[in-house]
Image: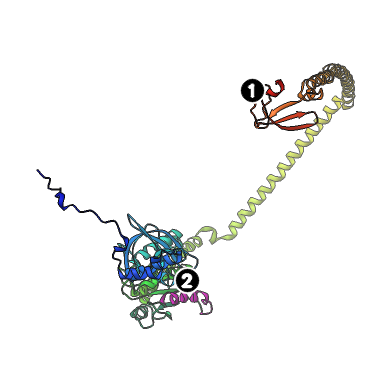
Amino acid sequence: MQSPFQWPADTIMARAPFDPNRIRVPREEQRLIKETSLLDDATLTVTQVTQMVKRAIEQHVPKTVHLVGEISNFKRHSSGHLYFVLKDEHSEIGCVMWKTVASKLKFDPSDGLEVFATGGVDVFERSGRYQLYVRRMEPKGVGALELAFRQLREKLKNEGLFDPARKKPLPRVPSRIAIVTSPTGAAIRDIINTIARRFPNIELMLYPVAVQGERATSEISTAIRDLNANNAHLGGIDLIIVGRGGGSLEDLWAFNEEQVARAIFDSSIPVISAVGHEVDVSISDLVADVRAATPTAAAELAVPVRHELEAGLEKIARQIHRLLYHRLEIARSSLEGLLNRRPHQDPEQIIRHREESVDRCATQLAHGISNQLHKANRTLNEAEVLLQRIRPDTLISRQKHSVSNVVDRLRWAMAERCRRSDRALLSAEHRLASASPQHRIVRLADSVENLSARLEAMSHKATLRRGFSITRTRRGKEVIRSTDQVRDDDVLLTETIDGTLESRVINRTQLELFE
């Protein structure tokens, strides 16, 4: 039975040989081949091949491509340009983002971050490498502004800008408040109305700035620094309120910029941040000394209610009045009690009692002095009698004789001790002289000299001086003791007493000597 996969013998045709000229080449490729003279088998230059690839990319790759990938090998050049690689599981592509585009990024790219990148593919002819020139980039999974907010918050937190210990207390009743906000927004009206209602005597200063847009960041930070630098010239500012009304995240973004955050942190004047609504939390809110949910809340935190403060002061004044009245009543009662005592009614009687006490003390003192003098005289008389009995001159003479005997004995003992020490020292000198290594050194020197002479006589130099020579192989410096150690054409070194000769083996067996 014939196999279904076998053709009949009469249908099998011979295959024609391969002819490359029969391949149908697209017209565009034919044009490129003609331009580079490929049909004439001409050799291409590297530049020509690179240009061909560049034109192929320009003609066949879309002008704008959208890629998703993970950032790797990220580098921010000193020029401001960004260089990195986008990769997925199977491949990667080099990317470039120019400074003008990179400066508009709201987040900081980093290795490992997955992003959406939009741009055009082109060939960098100098290195022959194709790469993506990124015109726009967004993080995947989270918005650029949200990611930028998180990155800056983490950075400033690690630097300690949110530390509660560094926050300054607000003044209880400020005299002058500076407000940094838009002059046309609702925030300034809310702040002015609230402060005027609560404490109309406080002086307000408006520093007008843009609160959104490209100029907002620079103007807000400059305003805060200007107010601090000119504080004394402006008559003293007790408090700064920075903020604006509600809006989208993009509208409020100026208050999430690092430049504004550092200006608030560096301020020596306490700062209240009031940005957006209660649910909006900005970097400025975290850095400021106090965060207010709204501009109106900032005004309420900045100043107390005047009539409440006055009522509190009146209450304190009443308490002080009651306390002083109570103290005066106690003092009056104490004074009346003292005046009603008997001594105060007849002070001359007190003086007479004191004079009587003084007289009694003087009598006791005179009697005591007399008794002490009597006792001293009696003691002196007894001592005189005792001295006469002891006769100190005799005692002194006896003690001098005893001391003289002790001195003589001490001198004899010292002389005897010195003699013993001299004898011991002389004996030690004799023993040291007998144990001195000088004699042994002389004997050892003679032995060393004899051994040196014997060693010199046994050295190969002595053998050479007697007319002998030593032959070695040049390779390995092996001493030749037998003809079996060499081969024809080996190079030998022969050492004599006055130098070394080099020779070559012509005939190892030297058969010609025996013919």
How would you classify the magenta stretch by its main secondary structure? helix
Which quadrant is the N terminus positioned in? Answer: top left
Query: Residue at left 76%, top 24%?
Result: 460
Residue occupying the far left of the picture? 1
Please identify the quarter of the rendering in which residue 323 is found: bottom left
Instruction: Say whether residue 497 is left or right of residue 118.
Output: right
How was this image coloured? rainbow
Task: Report the residue marked by disc 2.
Answer: 269
The answer to whether marks 2 and 1 mark residues whose Cβ atoms lie closer than 8 Å is: no
As drawn, 515 above or below 22? above
Task: Report the residue marked by disc 1.
Answer: 484
Residue 218 showing in the rendered view: yes
Closer to the N terminus: mark 2 or mark 1?
Answer: 2
Residue 39 location in percent, x, y?
38, 66
Residue type (three-letter) at the residue carrying disc 1: Asp
As drawn, 463 above or below 273? above
Local packing at callout 2 (Cα closer than 10 Å; few below 14, some 14-19, many 20+) is many
